[in-house]
Image: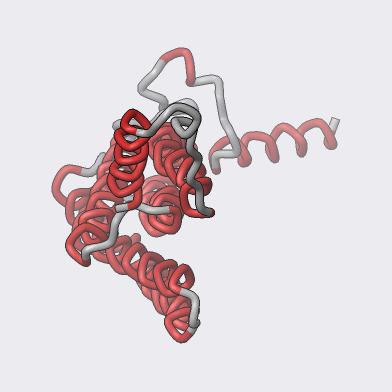
Amino acid sequence: IKEPFFDFLYDFEDSKADEAPVGMKSTLQTTFDMIFLDTELGIVSGLFNGLGLSLPAAYLVLLYGTNNIYLATFAFLSIVGIVGCVLGSIYVIGWTLGVAEAIAAIMVVGLSVDYCVHLGHMYAVAGEEGHHKRSERFEIAAKRMGPTVLAGFITTGGSASVMFFCQLEFFNKMAALIVLTVFFSLEFALCFYLPVNLLFGPEGHSGVLYGKNSCIPCLKSLSCGSKEAKGEQKTDAAAATFV
C-alpha cells in the first residue's frame, strides 16, 4: 500500500521541481514511513529467499526423520499445501504482504513440518516392528501418534490465541497466523498425509533411504541411528565384552 503512494509523492516532487525557479529546484521530503519502507521491502523480498531455503531444508529433515523417500515426499507436499492455504487465507482476509506476514510465512514452514514428521516416523517405525502392509502401518501411526498430534494442535493453538487480546496489531496477526498454521497442519496431517499413505504409502522396505534395506546401493552402509543398526551395535559390543 505504501510503495505506490510514495512513488506518487516522489513523482509529484520531481514535477514541481522542474517547474520551480532557479535556486528552488533542490527539494527534500521525508518521513519515518518513507525511511522504513526500504526495510519493509527488504523483508518482503527476503520472504521468497527464505522459502527457497526453508522448504528444501524441511525436505532434508523429513528424509532423515522418516528414512523413506515416499514418506518424505508426501509430507513435503503436505507442507507446500499448508503454506499455500495459510498465504491464501491472508489474501482472503485482505491483509497486505507486510513485515508480520513475511516473518510468519517463514515460520509456517517450520511449524507445518511437526505433525507430518511425527506421523511419518511412526509409519516407518511400524515397518521396523514387522508390520509391512499399508493398512497395518496406517492404523499404528493413527493410534499412537494421532492423539499426540491433536494435543499439539490444542496446546499450540490455545497458547497462540492469548495474543488475540493484545493491543498491538502485530501480535494479533501473529496469533491469527499461528492458529491458521496449526489448523491447516492438523487438517493436512490427518486428512491428507495419512490417507495418502494408506493408499500409496510404502510397503515392506520400499523407499528406504539408508540402512541395509536401502533402495540406494551406496547408502546401504549408513545406519544413522536406525533401530537395526543399534541392535547390531549392541551385539558387537556384547561380543567384544565376552572376548
Left/right of residue 192 with respect to residue 186 in the rendered view: left
**Is the image coloured rainbow, by chain, by secondary structure, or in one colour?**
secondary structure
Image quadrant where residue 231 sits: top right
Q: Residue at x 47, y 38 (%)?
A: 42
Front in this rendered view, residue 227 or 123: 123
Q: Quadrant of the C terminus?
A: top right
* Image vertical order of residue 211 relative to residue 101, above or below: above
**What percent of the width, then of the height, locates residue 2?**
34, 51
* Image vertical order of residue 211 relative to residue 185, above or below: above
Front in this rendered view, residue 183 or 137: 183
Left/right of residue 196 with respect to residue 48 in the rendered view: left
Q: Residue furthest bottom?
A: 165
Could you tell me if residue 14 is visible in this image?
yes
**What percent of the width, then of the height, locates residue 220?**
48, 21
Left/right of residue 44 with respect to residue 73 in the rendered view: right
Q: Residue at x 28, y 43 (%)?
A: 8
**What percent of the width, then of the height, locates residue 157?**
41, 75
Q: Residue at x 23, y 56 (%)?
A: 85
Q: Residue furthest front?
A: 21
Front in this rendered view, residue 12 or 189: 12
